[in-house]
Image: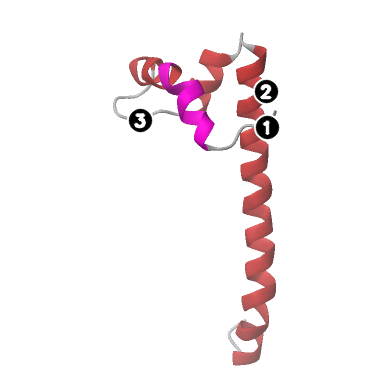
Amino acid sequence: MELGYSCFNSIFFPQTHQAMEIGRTGRVQVEDIIFLVRKDPRKYARVRDLLTMNEELKKARKAFDEVKYGGIRNWAGTG
């Protein structure tokens, strides 16, 4: 069963509080969450899936923006 992004909060809520305690004050780093869930294969796999999906979305957005706005910049003579 595929979990959505909203399930992230319910599954990782306790780990988020622990990460806030071990990490920098007021900030939760991705590495803190990975450290806390490293021994739970299901949670660790879900975190890795979400991080991979996030990277793929960033690359797709960047490629889309380059195609969409790249021609306008070149046409205007700015790039």
Calculate the distance from the C-alpha at mark 2 to the C-alpha at mark 3. Answer: 23 Å
- At x 70%, y 28%, the residue is 1
> Viewer-proximal residue, 65 or 12?
12
**What label does residue 2 carry, if any?**
1
Residue 78 in the figure: left or right of residue 28: right
Task: Please report the bounds of the magenta region as a residue range.
Answer: 6-14
> What is the x, y in percent for residue 63?
69, 63
**Amino acid type, label 1:** Glu
- At x 56%, y 15%, the residue is 37
Calculate the distance from the C-alpha at mark 1 to the C-alpha at mark 2. Answer: 12 Å
Furthest residue toward top: 39
Categorize mark 2 by other alpha carbons within 10 Å: few (<14), some (14-19), many (20+).
Answer: some
Residue ID for mark 3: 27
Instruction: Identify the main secondary structure in magenta.
Output: helix
- Contact between marks 1 and 2 (CB within 8 A): the answer is no
Residue ID for mark 2: 45
